[in-house]
Amino acid sequence: MVLGIKWTNLGVYLLNKLAALGSLLVFMCLYLLLASGFDLYDFTEYLSNLTLWGLIGGYALIVTMLIDFVTYKWIRVTFQTSILLHALAGFIVFLPVYGMNIFSVIAGSIGALCACIYAFSYAIIRKRRIGWVLLLMFPLLLSIRLIDFTIKEGWTEERTNSSFSAEFERFNGRNEIHISLKKGEEITCYLSIEQSNEGGHGFHVLDPKGKAVGMEMIEEQADTYEEYTNIQSDVFQFQAESEGTYRLIVRGHDLEGKIEVNWEID
């Protein structure tokens, strides 16, 4: 019976910690939404790095439980001191990697603020278990990141076995161009983006496993033609390390214009 009570208390303790982490995620997501100008595509891109989010969450849980263990076993501290210990842990995490510089100070200050939010959230949630509703943040965010919020207005496209082109009035998000390659084949891509506004753009390539492919840039010039300074042209190569479908992903940020891609396989 006593063992059952202990396990119950441990379960409640862990749920409270996870709920506090969910509360921190709420604040972080609100910040990311504001920073992206409520651009849902950019927001889901921030969420897509599960490794980074896992490191943040894992570090937060390990540190907070370590602080609890130390203060429970050996040193009794006040709530204010506990907050300071969490803030210190959030601040120093960047020092071993980046050393003492302005970036570490800024990043550490943000980390300390996040740690304080976490500690305050836990203090509230442990008294009111209604805070467990914050556990829903984890499946909610995992679901949201799977939604493609790409916006394509006035979009028309054409595709052949060795080319792709699209014209659009507004492109905000990503467009995937699938290219099937055999192991050892080398592909040369000619990518041209003509823009009619000040929107941003970029591109990268993913292999069949979804990993980024290293590319050799053969030619890169901002002004392809002197009379057309709004045309960006890139020529790059890469070799297929495995057989499958490779994805050339072109990104646009409130872009208006035209995309043309041609490729040769050797």
Image: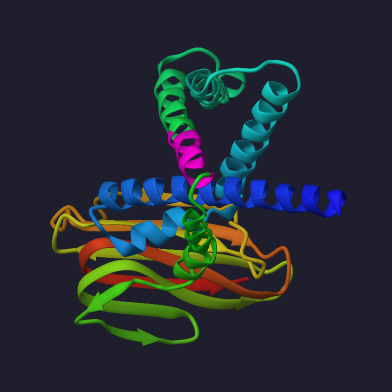
Please say which color scheme the image uses: rainbow
Total marks in image: 0
**Furthest residue toward front:** 1
In the rendered view, tell whether residue 2 sits above or below residue 106.
below
Q: Which residues are magenta?
A: 117-126
* Left or right position of 93 against 259: right
In this rendered view, identify the residue nearer to me: 112 or 104.
112
Nearest to the observer: residue 157 or residue 9: 9
Look at 68% across and 15% down and name the residue there: 75
Q: Considering the whole magenta stretch, tell me its main secondary structure.
A: helix
Q: Is residue 122 above or below residue 171?
A: above
Q: Residue at x 62, y 52 (%)?
A: 15
Q: Residue at x 61, y 42 (%)?
A: 55
Residue 147 placement, left or right of 1: left
**Measuring 59% from the left and 17% from the top, which residue is drawn there?**
77
Give coordinates of residue 50: x percent, y percent: 57, 54
Query: Quadrant where the N terminus lies?
Result: bottom right
Q: Quadrant of residue 233?
A: bottom left
